[in-house]
Amino acid sequence: MSTTARIAIAGAGLGGLLCARVLQRHGVPVTVFERESSPGSRSQGGTLDIHEDTGQAALRAAGLFDEFLALSRPESQEWRLYDRHATLIRHDRAGEDDLSRPEIDRGRLRALLLDSLAPGTVRWGHSVRTVTPLPRGAVRLHHQDRTGEDFDLVIGADGAWSRVRPALSDARPAYSGVTLVEARFEDVDRRHPGIAELVGRGTMSAKAGRRSLVLQRNGDGHVRAYVNFRGPRDWHAGLDLADTPAVRACLLAQYRGWHESLLDILRDNEGGFVNRPVYVLPVDHSWRRVPGITLLGDAAHLMPPVGVGANLALLDGADLARAVIGHPTVGQAVDAYESVMLPRATAHAKTARQMLDTLMPDTDSDEAFFPDSLWPANG
């Protein structure tokens, strides 16, 4: 494709940034619009396991695989599964040379991608309001300040509540029936040795029926906790979510009868709790093609958080960039990309939905089961 093509990416998440990186590696200019005011304006979330056949393949296409490995934590592929009595049911460790799914903090991966881009690529504090198709295939991108810019290709990489998606699809994310309540621990090995023992070097999950407690070790002694349960989206009705003691009491009541060491996850966290209801797009989400507009990552295929989303976003970004580079027109590039991305997304979305139903069944059974596909190794 001609290097005079005007390309915009809405959203400086992992998929959008990787797409921009691959385009720039091949001499194709691109502008990324991000509503956040700066790279450090908010926390970027927890740790990610980057899979060999998806996320790692995308990082290789971006020429960043070696840098990724230097930042990653292969030892954090360790998984522990407990029942609600804190009995260890399964403990898997990846082999010494296993790099199939090394962990990396999302913030570090995003920083790696940002640092790989030409200065000025990302326009911070520029939120996209809408996009409008124009005659002859051009697209107008409307900013929140009511100004507009015209492009040959606008890529919606702006996540679950994408402002680009409505130009293609009427679909909106729906509540999955599962909520995650996030908490955190700092300097865990020194200040919270019990939590450190539970989580080990990687991830632990304690499960019983429709509830679970998850710990994930991040870098720099930080651990994120996720209190997961199936129930109504308004489970906190009548509660002020900013009232940490009240939220803690409510959660402790839900987990009454669990082992005291597991209840420490709810009692000893630092700071407050963050409510994160899990939303999803339809499994078979697709759209009728509109010239000059496409989507990637959560904007295209929002799925339950079972280790797939970030990896697919990275692969989407690489595939879309390579399609742009390898085809003479925007239309041909988008057709080639979507013909691969959409069926792949549908297949992964079906699997992710099945995993969510398995992990968080609507039952009070004490059975603690975890699908083999989520384990880093078979031990």
Image: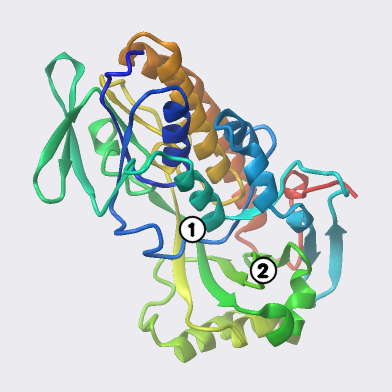
Relative side of 120 to 336, left or right: left
Q: Position of residue 159 (x, y in %)?
A: 38, 46
For badge 1, the amino acid type reads Gly
Q: Residue at coordinates 15% horizontally, 40% vertically from top-left? A: 142
Q: Is residue 195 visible?
A: yes
Choose top left, top right, bottom left or bottom right for residue 325: top left
Vertical arrangement, residue 176 with respect to residue 24, above or below: below
Where does label 1 land, which residue?
Answer: 177
Q: Is residue 259 visible?
A: no
Q: Name the outermost residue toward the bottom.
A: 245
In front: mark 2 or mark 1? 2
In what element is the residue under mark 1?
strand
Q: Position of residue 339 (x, y in %)?
A: 46, 18
Vertical arrangement, residue 74 with respect to residue 57, above or below: below
Vertical arrangement, residue 48 with respect to residue 336, above or below: below
Relative side of 263 to 74, left or right: left
Choose top left, top right, bottom left or bottom right for residue 137: top left
Q: Earlier in the sequence, mark 2 or mark 1?
A: 1
Q: Position of residue 187 (x, y in %)?
A: 65, 79
Q: Residues within 10 Å of mark 2 (few under 14, many from 20)?
A: many
For badge 2, the amino acid type reads Leu
Where does label 2 land, which residue?
Answer: 215
Relative side of 128 to 32, left or right: left
Closer to the camera in the image, 224 or 276:
224
Closer to the camera in the image, 345 or 200:
200
Q: Position of residue 63 (x, y in %)?
A: 58, 32
